[in-house]
Image: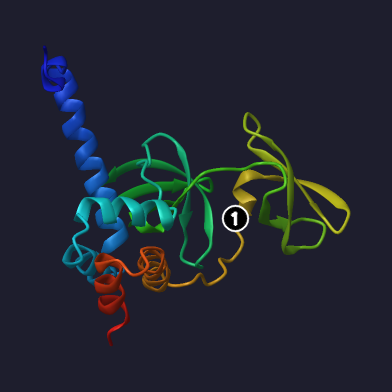
Amino acid sequence: MNSPQSKLDDAGLNEVVRRAQEIQDQTQLMLEPNPDLEQYVKAAEEAGIHRDATMQALRERLSFPIEMFKAGEYVFAKSADGFFYVAMLHSIDGRKANVEFLTGTEHFCDAGDLRLFSLTPGQKVSYFSKSAGMWREGRLTKFRREKQQVTVTSWGESETVALEKVRLPKEVTPIPMSDRARMWAIGVASALGGGVVGAILMKLLTRS
């Protein structure tokens, strides 16, 4: 009987290696800005949980995107004012990304300053209102990709603006990833109840 490995040709094996590298890069993006997450991974290892399993669970629990950003596609990129505007991703190499905002400005940034591009009806966005002469927030009702326009409704009034005049609303300060990881891991330990693994993991996570 053929082993699973024998069913993979060279192209298939190359794809496995490529995918492994992709996951490793994304994992690094998650860990680098949050070095304190490493202690929870080590705590789980000491409790007998394999590192890869913990990392996968963290990615799922923290909703960290596994898919890589792709050159030639739209993204939301962080500008100097701290907001995320629509930009074309020209290239990405590890953590280094080269984007061009729709205004024509080229920008180099960290991959952590990118967000996946998505504009769907009902989504809350910030936009520059010509009628008000200022930035406002509203709900997106229509996105015309071919015309690079969006229609937004705010306070019962609809307005169509150019895509370059749209940005993501200021992000609400989220629970730090390390705290979310702690809550997740303690939840795992609690679920394990009186088991040895649960006791060890709880002890490691609650120590100062």
Q: Between residue 32 and residue 197, name the one nearer to us.
A: 197
Q: Is residue 8 above or below residue 83?
A: above
Residue located farthest toward the front when viewing the structure as drawn: 194
Q: Nearer the viewer, residue 193 or 133?
A: 193
183 relative position to 34: left or right: right
When asked about the image quadrant of residue 15, the answer is top left
Identify the image quadrant of the C terminus: bottom left
Q: Residue 191 in the image: x percent, y percent?
A: 41, 63
Q: Position of residue 82 (x, y in %)?
A: 50, 67
Q: Which residue is mark 1?
A: 167
* Residue at 36%, 37% in the rendered image: 71
Q: Quadrant of residue 14?
A: top left
Whole-percent x, y for residue 147 in the image: 66, 32
User: Where, quadrant-wise, is the N terminus in this rendering?
Assistant: top left
Q: Amino acid at mark 1?
A: Arg
Q: Secondary structure at mark 1?
A: strand
Residue at image location 66% in from the left, 55% down from the top: 125
Q: In the figure, residue 207 lies in which quadrant?
A: bottom left
